[in-house]
Amino acid sequence: MAVVSTPGQVAVAFVAYAGLLSAVTAIAGVSVGFVARGLVVETPFVVFAALLPFFAGGEQVDVGGLALSREGLADAGTLLAKATLGIWTSMLLAGTTRPQELVAALQRLRLPRLLVETLSFMVRYLDVVADDLRRMRIARESRGFHARGPRHWGVLAASAGALFIRSYERGERVYLAMLSRGYAGRLVLSNDRPATGREWLTGATLPVLGALVCVAAWVTGR
Amino acid sequence: MTTPALEVRDLAYAYPDGRQVLYGVNLTVHAGERVALLGPNGAGKTTLVLHLNGILTAGHGSVTVAGLPVAREHLLEIRRRVGVVFQDPDDQLFMPTVAEDVAFGPTNLGLDRAAVAERVTEALTAVGMADHADRAPHHLSFGQRRRVAVATVLAMRPEILVLDEPTSNLDPASRRELADILESLSLPTLVVTHDLPYAWQLCPRSVLLDDGVVVADRPTPELLADSELLRSHRLELPYGFDPAAV
C-alpha cells in the first residue's frame, strides 16, 4: 500500500523501496530465481507500459528517433516500478509463509468462512489433483499420444472432463469421511498460536519503513 | 451376556436407483472380537460399512452399536462409537496438517483445546506417528498416511473399529506395522478385506458376504479351509499359501 500511494515523480522513493525489499529478501533467504518467476505475472503490465508512451497525449519528447509522450514515459515508469515492487513483496510473502499458515492467517483476518474452507481444501488437494493430471498424461503418452494442435484438443478436453469427474467423486468421498467424524457444518481451522512480541516486531519492520519512505516522498515531492 | 459391540439385524438396502444391494444381513461383533468381512467385489461390503455409522439409512432392519441404535437422534454419538477407516487415506486426510486432521474428530465432539491436544498426542503415539504431527499429509508415504487415517479415528475413542481394505497398496513392512498396531489396540474390530492371510493372522472369526447376504460365519481357519465354499464366491488362497503350515 505504501508503494501504490507514493507519488510517481519521486523516483528516489522507488529506489528506497527496492533497497528495503532486497534487504528483506536476503535476510529471509528467498531465492532470486523464485522472485523472478513470480515477476512473469507482470508481463501484461509490461506490455501496457511499453505502449503508453506511444498513445498518451501531451508534450512530446524525442527518444531514439521516436516521438514519445513525456507524460506517457513517466506514467509507464511509475507503473512498472509499482507493479514490480508489488509483485516482489507478494513473492516474499509466498516464499516465507507456508500455504497452511496463509490460510489460517486469512481466517484470522475474517475472510468469509466459506472462502477460507475452500482455500484450505485447495491447498490440501492441489497436489493430489496435479498428481492425477500427471498420471493421465503419462498414460496418454504411453499409448503414443502427443498433443500437437487443435485437432488433439478433443482428447485433452476428454481428459480434463475425466479429471473433473474424478475430483468431484473424491469430493463426495471426503464429505462422507468428514460426516463419519462428526462434521456438522463448521470446519475448525486452527493453526493456532498467537504471535509473539518478537514476531510482531519483525513483521512490522518492513511496512513501517515503507510507510516512512512514502511519507518522506509526499513531503519532499511538493 | 454383555451387550455386543455391534449388532446388525435383517439389514436390507436398495440404492435410490432401485438396485437392491443388501437382502437381510445379520452380523454380531462382541466385545474384544476381531472379525473379518470377506467377499467378492460387489458383494455389498462397503455398503454395509456405510450403514454402520449412519451414512446410509437402511430400508429395513436395524444396526445397534454398543446398545445404541443407529438413528438420526444419536448420529454424533454413533459416529464417535464407530470408527471407520476408509480405503483411500487421501479421502480421509483432508486438513492441512496431520495434527489438524487427527484433531478434527475430537473437535466435532465438542472437546476443549486441551482435551483435543491430549487426544491427538494419544492417537498419534498409538500408531507411531507422533513425530509427524505438523507435516502435510501429501508429504507422507502411503503407509504413513494409512496409519494417520487410523489415528484420526482413534482420537474419538471409538467402541468399534471398522477398516475397509486396510492392506490395499501397502508394502509388506507397512502391512506388518499395521497388524502390530491393530493387535496392540484391544478394540472390537471389523476388517473388510480381500487379503485372506491377513484375515487369518488377525481375525479369529470370519464372515463371508456375497450378493447382499451372509453366506458363512465361522472361525477363520475353518472357513478358509473350505476351498469349495471360497471358490464358489470368487475367493482363493494366494499361491503357495498353505493353511496347514500356519
Image: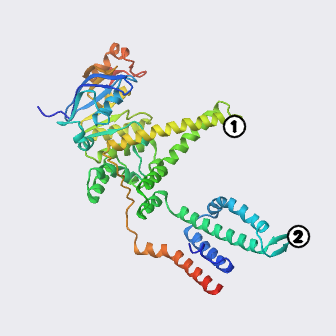
Q: Residue at the spot x=55%, y=62% of the render?
A: A95
Mark 2 falls on what kind of element?
loop
Q: Which mark is residue A158?
A: none
Q: Amino acid at mark 2?
A: Gly
**Quarter of the rendering containing residue B196:** top left
What colouring style does the render use?
rainbow
Of labels 1 and 2, the one closer to you: 2
Callout 1: 10 Å neighbours few (<14), some, many (20+)? few
Check the image and report above or below for A112 versus A127. below
> Hey, which residue is sitting farthest top in the picture?
B228
Left or right of residue A143, residue B66 in this image: left
Q: Position of residue A137 (x, y in %)?
A: 61, 38
> Hey, which residue is sitting farthest front in the picture?
A57
Q: Residue at the spot x=77%, y=66% of the render?
A: A55
- Asked whether the residues under marks 1 and 2 belong to the same chain, the reply is yes
Mark 1 falls on what kind of element?
loop
Q: Position of residue A178 (x, y in %)?
A: 36, 44
Please give the chain letter of the residue carrying mark 1: A
Disc 2 designates what residue?
A65
**Alpha carbon of mark 1 to alpha carbon of mark 2: how far?**
45 Å
Disc 1 designates what residue?
A147
Q: Residue at the spot x=67%, y=71% of the render?
A: A81
Q: How many labels were placed on the picture?
A: 2
Callout 2: 10 Å neighbours few (<14), some, many (20+)? few
Left or right of residue A44, residue B238 in this image: left
> Hey, which residue is sitting farthest left in the picture?
B1
Q: Position of residue A210 (x, y in %)?
A: 56, 77
Q: From where the camera sits, is residue A96 visible? A: yes
Q: Amino acid at mark 1?
A: Ala
